Image (cartoon, rainbow, N blue to C red):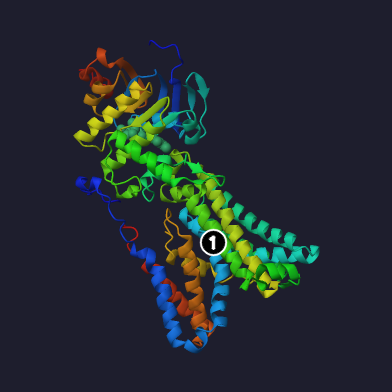
Amino acid sequence: MTTTTAAPLRLEGVSKHFGGVTAIQRFDLEVAPGEIVALVGDNGAGKSTLVKIISGLYQPSEGSIEINGEQVTFRDAADARAKGVEVVYQDLALVDLQPVYMNLFLGRELRRGPLRVLDRKEMARQTQQLVDDLDVRIPSARALLGDLSGGQRQGIAIARATHWASGLVLMDEPTAALGVAETAKVEEVILKLKQRGAAVLIVSHNLDQVFRIADRVTVLRRGTQVGTRPTAGTDKNEVIGMITGLSS
Amino acid sequence: MSTTDTDTREGTTRRLPAVDWRASVVYVGFVLTFLFFAVTQSQYFLTPTNLTNVVIQAAPIAIMAVGAVFVLSTGEIDLSIGSTVALASLGAALVLESTGNWLLGAAAGLAVGAAVGAVNGVFVTYVRLPSFLVTLASMGLVTGIARQLTDLQSVPVTDDAFVWIFGGGDLLGVPTIIWWTVVVTIVGAHLLRQRRFGAHVLAVGNNTPAARVSGVRVDRVRMWVFVLSGMTAAMAALLYSGRLQGARYTLGESDLLSVLAAVIVGGTALTGGKGSMVGALIGSLLISMINNGLILAGLNVSQQMIVRGIIILLAVSLSLRGKKQG
Ligand SMILES: Nc1ncnc2c1ncn2[C@@H]1O[C@H](COP(=O)(O)OP(=O)(O)OP(=O)(O)O)[C@@H](O)[C@H]1O
Ligand SMILES: [Mg+2]
């Protein structure tokens, strides 16, 4: 790595047990600024669990998490956010009965005046500008989120993460629900984040996508980290072998 | 689930907001009920005294409805509000009797309400029990304490200031009880619509995990809505004790159904995520008007209960129908 600054994300020996079940076992990873690392593995391998540990939803049973060189313990998602960790969750985490702009600003609403009332107008304006920039086509920033299509909702979830992203962005299958054109658009956005210097950890089942955008790929099999490879130094067959445990 | 068949060509056109007819049930119901009683009971119903009565009777319901809108919007329920009215009124009256200070009396009543709400909140958020169980239990508990506290005796309220402020008085020709209702409703609407707290309440009620990962402190929100609910019940208790010049363990005992009906008919979703303060206010007036009209129609108490039950069931089904398919 060319940078001398501390890594946006450093995991050391992170494990997670749910009762007797070991979901993650001694996971190590470092993601540099401007680097995209893909996290792959079969269903139930522990990918989402790892994302939830880094984003503060679960506490690791063992191991340490460092954000920008500082060791952290997150009590909840708000803590992680405060440290600049942005997440696009697999199940989207959006609120259907609220307008698009409230979804973008939920938990960090803009307020105005001495009474600190919600500044709906400004939130709607910034949202409109953001979705225009990212080319997410929605009827209006004031539309109810529940009235949007699956692809539009995914677009909003990603727009939210990009809007707030400063250091680290976690994405759990961000293109799973998308068509070809929308997927291309999302990949473009992810590459933009990389250019901005953000560290990106992306969970994906789509190996073509992994080789298109990621710098490195790390493989989980039933909670165990099988290995990490630069995408330039490996191929699909090797990665599939690592995922399934069958050498080809 | 939401429909996802939006044509992409629609993407650029701004759709008109669909008229949600359920949201207007309460207004249509209000007008129709008004007309019905105006025609059938014209000689009494339309007199200024009677109409003022309708509004005054609606006041405690409307105030409790403000708390209930928050609780239901969070996707919870508070069944203990009626019993809280009884205990808070006795608490206020006893402190008033022993100190002679109206402010201390009022503060004691509100503190009782906040305490009951806090206990409910702790069991819902930290012990993680369903709120209908918690508040069903606390309803029994609080009723028992209220009956025990004065051994079923009423406590008179004779303090002039207290009586004037909470119900008996009259400011600029308008009874103070109505001023209180207006103030509490406006504060409630402000909290729900214009403040971060309200946005978080609605988010928690609509999608709790989403709210949590968005950094909303879900437990804190839940805790606060129960405290608010207890405090609006206590506010209603102060108004009852002021107006009736006394506190009694029976105060508020039939209010729970009225409050829930007013709130749900008023467009607040029983399933959370959606709330309306103005709807709840109109709903409270509607319930009060129905109670009043039934008395004028000469129905005895048992008959009133039967008719009221049927009307509420109908009104609530109307306003909830199709909600899930939405
Ligand atoms: N809260 C929990 N309690 C108990 N077990 C859990 C919990 N969350 C996840 N697990 C278990 O941990 C394992 C890993 O689950 P996880 O959701 O992380 O998989 P994943 O790799 O994201 O799979 P997918 O590709 O299907 O999204 C699974 O066996 C799952 O059942
Ligand atoms: Mg997953």
In this figure, which residue is indicated by the disc labeled 1? B185
At which x and y percent is residue B305? Answer: 50, 78
Note whether residue B294 is visible: yes
Q: Is residue A179 above or below residue B271?
A: above
Looking at the rendered structure, the secondary structure element under dot 1 is helix
The residue sitting at 20% across, 34% down in the picture is A181
What is the chain identity of the residue bearing mark 1? B
Please give the count of numbered marks on the rendered protein: 1
Q: Quadrant of the N terminus of chain A?
A: top left
Q: Amino acid at mark 1?
A: Thr
Up-down: is A97 above or below A56? below
The x, y position of residue A41, in whole percent, is 30, 27
**Image coords of residue B105 (percent x, y):** 73, 62
Q: Nearer the viewer, residue B52 or B226?
A: B52
Q: Residue at x 36, y 24 (%)?
A: A200
- Picture coordinates of residue A159, whole percent (x, y): 34, 35
| Quarter assignment of residue A22 | top left
Residue B270: image quadrant is: bottom left
The residue lying at 42 percent from left, 42 percent from top is A123
Taking the image as four quarters, which one is ligand 1 found in? top left
Answer few, some or many: residues within 10 Å of disc 1's Cα (few below 14, many 20 plus, some between 14 and 19). many
Q: Is residue A92 visible?
A: no
Q: Is residue B83 left or right of residue B23?
A: right
